[in-house]
Image (spheres, grey):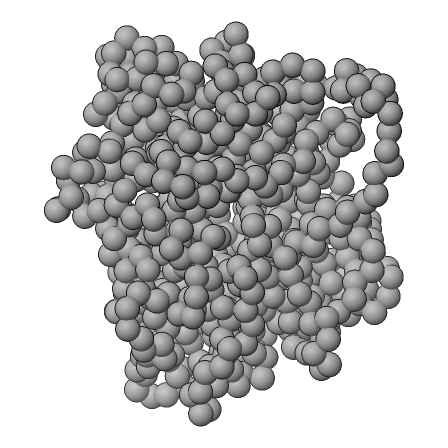
């Protein structure tokens, strides 16, 4: 069975929080796929004279948001049954649709024609060219699973009101597939098995215990369940799907706060590979022997192990490590145990690796800070590499863009805070204004990779520092939990001290520093503007501003994560006073500098009323605030035209209130 499409495990609570608040507003290619693979390729740079260098600085070209978003965002890597094509989603039409990309390099074929709702392509059928895909309605995040027939007709396999469903992989016989849905109980997801011939189905696991459905072994015998006990504590259970009386067997008994999560089963179904942070700061990969129930360390690194998975035939194993905001990988030949030697690749990082059924073909993406993701195919055992997409705008030269540098600074208590710094070309000849960009979450992470929005601002003369404040993932469990029930306090001080760091740089205009971010980053932006006088401007992109309302109105299907949310942020039943105190909406009158608020009307996470009230609260204090609403978006931008409009608005607002 193919690996589930799931968020990679690093801390089970991060998954929960990410579902709640993780920023998704900018570029789909920024987000790491669950099979993300990064291998940095460097090139030698010839020394050049100072005169030549200055000439380049003075002649570099600036581009518009329209130029940057002429790129095509693309994701997905399912290879069809005869290894002739890849199934992807891209936004060439302005919104994501499904495409068939032939491996021979011929032109892609558009398979869906949505003009309103994003299409998330899941998988080809194992024996023909039908496809499965997911889509919600207007950004409401109630995804349904659809099938596209060979004649182009589509059918919703998960009909019903207010339900949420996800494709969850293939049965080993290739004649059945799995879907999870909360149609029976809106709080929890049950597992169904569908037949490929007529789409009839049966429930094979009824989830009454508030578990998170994990993955299924190749022989369709074992199902893993993940149980969230708290924001730092979780367990794995096993269910024998062949047993008449199914029970949940706990396989991760422990004491104290330890997090566990599922990676995958080995293809022979003899071992489960799982994650645990029991033995240090970072997640390690361990194996659980399904026959004798013994555990053994499988793979570890000095950072979090993000994923371990196998090719369909088990010949190759791919593992990824989240190393300082980039995912580094190993591809192993399981028959020899040796690392696979790949041919020379184009400059950039590898992502989204997948194999054909017989492992003869490998498809992957190459992405960098200065170039969006492009899809490639490699014939294993040869030097053959073929590029299958052209995602970039040919009118944009990478020489005019900027590579981010991972740097660190000391916060108020001496804690070292990592961030990704972008120095614009203009800064070579004059001081420039700068922005601190806060990621989503809490528990998210700013990562290396292409962002049209970031490059647009940098190209137009703004320094950017993408902070990974305390509470971010990827830097150990202690760092990850330093902000528990201290949001708007210690993490906000990290942002303030990030400003002090920027002021220490000789190319930054110390009096022209702003803050911006989306979702949780939007909250941090409003907290910075309401609770400090440090920043000249703020841009809040669908940020939480009323924690009391947010935590009282979480969607039913987040029930399994409720305890984690309360551990992280506070229980509104007992912590309402503190939650009120850290909610900027009640203190908008204290904002002294201009703010831009961006909101999607259909956002199910940050309700429109929350941004409405935040805007009115700022205006009550007499401070300038601008409000940008999108009638056809939810919690993020699914449509290219809206990304362009938002980016243009950011630049116009910053030019007016920060640069001058």
* Residue drawn at (25%, 37%) of the image: 547
Q: Is residue 529 above or below residue 658?
A: below
Instruction: Quadrant for the N terminus, please.
Output: bottom right
Foreground residue among 361 and 582: 582
Left or right relative to 523: residue 512:
right
Q: Quadrant of residue 586?
A: top left
Instruction: Tell me, yes or no, if residue 4 can be seen here.
Output: yes
Foreground residue among 123 and 589: 589
How many marks can you see? Answer: 0
Q: Position of residue 2 (x, y in %)?
A: 57, 69
Q: Position of residue 507 (x, y in %)?
A: 61, 21
Instruction: Tell me, yes or no, if residue 28 can be seen here.
Output: no
Q: Is residue 636 above or below residue 183?
A: above
* Residue drawn at (72%, 58%) of the image: 363
Q: Is residue 531 above or below residue 208?
A: above
Q: Is residue 165 above or below residue 603?
A: below
Q: Position of residue 428 (x, y in %)?
A: 69, 20
Q: Quadrant of residue 328?
A: bottom right
Q: Position of residue 511 (x, y in %)?
A: 48, 14
Left or right relative to 144: residue 605:
left
Foreground residue among 380 and 312: 380
């Amino acid at each position: 069975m193919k690996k589930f499409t799931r968020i990679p495990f690093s801390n089970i609570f991060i998954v929960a929080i990410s579902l709640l608040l993780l920023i998704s507003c900018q570029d789909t290619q920024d987000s790491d796929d669950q099979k993300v693979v990064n291998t940095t390729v460097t090139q030698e740079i010839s020394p050049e004279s100072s005169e030549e260098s200055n000439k380049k600085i003075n002649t570099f070209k600036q581009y518009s948001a329209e130029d940057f978003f002429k790129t095509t965002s693309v994701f997905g890597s399912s290879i069809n049954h005869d290894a002739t094509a890849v199934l992807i989603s891209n936004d060439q039409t302005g919104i994501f649709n499904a495409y068939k990309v032939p491996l021979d390099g011929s032109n892609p074929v558009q398979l869906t024609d949505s003009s309103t709702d994003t299409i998330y392509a899941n998988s080809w059928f194992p024996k023909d060219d039908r496809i499965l895909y997911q889509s919600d309605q207007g950004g409401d995040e109630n995804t349904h699973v659809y099938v596209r027939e060979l004649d182009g007709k589509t059918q919703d396999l998960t009909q019903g009101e207010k339900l949420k469903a996800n494709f969850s992989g293939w049965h080993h016989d290739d004649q059945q597939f799995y879907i999870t849905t909360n149609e029976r109980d809106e709080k929890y997801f049950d597992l169904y098995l569908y037949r490929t011939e007529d789409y009839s189905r049966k429930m094979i696991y009824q989830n009454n215990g508030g578990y998170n459905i994990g993955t299924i072994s190749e022989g369709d015998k074992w199902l893993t369940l993940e149980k969230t006990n708290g924001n730092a504590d979780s367990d794995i259970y096993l269910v024998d799907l062949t047993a008449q009386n199914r029970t949940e067997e706990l396989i991760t008994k422990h004491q104290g706060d330890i997090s566990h999560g599922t990676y995958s089963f080995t293809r022979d179904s003899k071992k489960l590979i799982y994650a645990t942070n029991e033995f240090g700061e970072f997640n390690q990969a361990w194996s659980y022997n399904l026959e004798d129930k013994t555990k053994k360390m499988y793979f570890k690194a000095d950072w979090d192990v993000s994923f371990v998975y196998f090719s369909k035939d088990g010949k190759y194993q791919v593992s990824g490590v989240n190393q300082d905001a980039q995912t580094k990988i190993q591809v192993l030949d399981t028959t020899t145990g040796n690392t696979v030697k790949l041919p020379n690749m184009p400059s950039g990082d590898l992502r989204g690796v997948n194999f054909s059924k017989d492992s003869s073909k490998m498809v992957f993406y190459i992405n960098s800070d200065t170039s969006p993701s492009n899809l490639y195919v490699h014939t294993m055992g040869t030097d053959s590499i073929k590029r299958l997409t052209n995602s970039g705008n040919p009118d944009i030269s990478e020489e005019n863009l900027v590579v981010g540098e991972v740097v660190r600074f000391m916060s108020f208590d001496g804690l070292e805070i990592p961030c990704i710094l972008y120095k614009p070309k203009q800064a070579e000849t004059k001081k420039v204004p700068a922005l601190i960009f806060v990621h989503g979450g809490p528990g998210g992470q700013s990562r290396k990779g292409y962002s049209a929005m970031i490059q647009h601002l940098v190209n137009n003369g703004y320094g950017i520092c993408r902070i990974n404040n305390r509470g971010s993932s990827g830097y150990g469990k202690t760092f990850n939990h330093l902000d528990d029930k201290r949001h708007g306090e210690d993490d906000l001080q990290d942002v303030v001290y990030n400003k002090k760091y920027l002021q220490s740089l000789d190319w930054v205009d110390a009096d022209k520093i702003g803050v911006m971010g989306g979702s949780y980053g939007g909250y941090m932006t409003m907290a910075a503007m309401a609770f400090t006088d440090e920043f000249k401007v703020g841009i809040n992109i669908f940020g939480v501003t009323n924690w009391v309302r947010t935590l009282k109105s979480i969607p039913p299907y987040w029930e399994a994560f409720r305890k984690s949310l309360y551990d992280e942020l506070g229980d509104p039943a007992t912590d309402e006073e503190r939650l009120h105190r850290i909610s900027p909406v009640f203190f908008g009158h204290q904002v002294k500098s201009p703010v831009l608020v961006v909101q999607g009307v259909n956002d199910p996470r940050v309700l429109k009323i929350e941004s409405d009230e935040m805007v009115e609260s700022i205006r009550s204090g007499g401070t300038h605030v601008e409000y940008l609403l999108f009638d056809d978006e939810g919690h993020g931008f699914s449509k290219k035209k809206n990304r362009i409009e938002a980016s243009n608005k950011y630049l116009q607002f910053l030019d007016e209130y920060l640069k001058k």
